[in-house]
Amino acid sequence: MKRIMIVVAYEGTKYCGWQSQPNQITVEEVINRELSALLGETIQVIGASRTDSGVHAMGNVAVFDTNTRIPAEKICYALNRSLPEDIVVQSSREVPADFHPRHCNSYKTYEYKIWNADFIQPFNRKYTHFVYRDLDIEAMQTAAKDFLGTHCFTSFCSTHTQVQDHVRTINSLEVLKNEHLVTIRIRGNGFLYNMVRIIAGTLIKIGIHEMPATCVSSIIEAENREAAGPTAPAQGLMLVGIEYPDLV
C-alpha cells in the first residue's frame, strides 16, 4: 500500500464544489470514480481544500491509498485520459503514509478576480466578478494591510462554519490592477468557510466608498459576521496553490 498525492486543476462552473454530496456532481466524486476504474480498487481521495460550488482551482491537492503497480508519477497521465476536459491532474507523486493534506503545515494562495469596467467581458464572465462602479484601488490596498498577521477572523467567516477555532494567519494580501482586471491575491496558513470571498466583498465595498479604508481593524475586533461586507460571488475565486514546506 502506498499513498499518492495529486495536484488537481479544475474549472468549477458546473460542479457543486469539491466535496462529494448526495445527488450532486462534484470534483471529488468524478476523481474517485475515474481513479477507481483506472486502478481496479475502491478509491476515496482526501482533499486539502473543500472549495465551494462554482469556485475554480489551479492547484488543489488530494491524496489516496492504493496497491497499484503503476508508478506514482505516471498515474496523472493515465488518469487524465478519462477525466472530463474541465478537470486535469497536474502531477502525481508518492508521499509518506502519514501525510494528510489538511493536517500538515501548509500555506494556501487564493486569487479573487474582478472585472471593473462599464460593461462585462463575456469571455471572462465565468472567472471574474463584474463591478461597474469605479474601484478606489489605493483605498483597497490601504485596507488590505490591516488583514496581515494573526487574528480571530470570526467576522470574516460564514455563520454556518463548523470549526471552533477562528484564528488564522494571513502572510500577504495584495490588490493589483491591470487595466480592467483587479486581482486580490491572498496567502495564509488556512482559511475559514467563505473567508476569502467575505474579505473580497469587504474590499469591494471599500473600493466603491461604501465602507472606509480604516474599517478592517474594527471589523476584526467586532467578531461579528454582520460587521463585514458581503460574500463576493463564487466565480471570481481561484485556489492558486498549496505549499507544504515540510514535504520533501
Image (tube, rainbow, N blue to C red):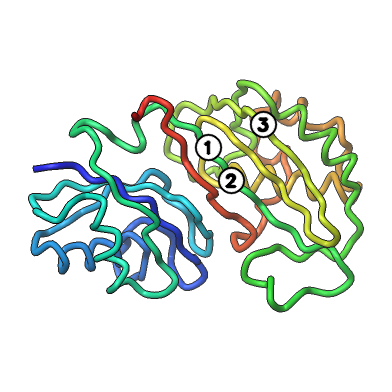
231 sits to left or right of 133:
left
**Residue at horizontal 8 percent and vertical 64 percent from the top:** 40
Q: Position of residue 152 (x, y in %)?
A: 59, 25
Residue occupying the point 40% across, 64% down: 88
Going from the N terminus, do you reach mark 1 or mark 2 first?
2
Which of the 4 image quarters holds residue 125? bottom right
Relative to 236, is 201 above or below? above
Q: Is residue 147 left or right of residue 139?
A: left
Number of dots carrying numbers = 3
Binning the other alpha carbons within 10 Å of mark 2 as few (below 14), some (14 to 19) or many (20 upward) gives: many
Instruction: Identify the image quadrant of residue 44.
Output: bottom left
Q: Earlier in the sequence, mark 3 or mark 1?
A: 3
Q: Secondary structure at mark 2?
A: strand
Q: The N terminus appears in which quarter of the rendering?
A: top left
**Residue 61: percent from the left, percent from the top?**
38, 47
Residue at far top of view: 150
- In terms of secondary structure, where does tag 1 sit? loop
Q: Residue 110, position in %: x, y?
A: 58, 46
**Circle 2 sits on which residue?**
110
**Is 78 or 17 nearer to us in this picture?**
78
Q: Is residue 247 above or below residue 158?
A: above
For marks 3 and 1, give the CA distance: 13 Å
Which residue sits at x=56%, y=32%?
188
Give the residue at mark 3.
Answer: 172
Q: Residue at horizontal 25%, vertical 37%?
A: 95
The secondary structure type at the circle numbered 3 is strand
Q: Amino acid at mark 2?
A: Tyr
Callouts 1 and 2 close, C-beta under 8 Å: yes
How far across and how far down the image is residue 240, in percent?
Answer: 54, 49
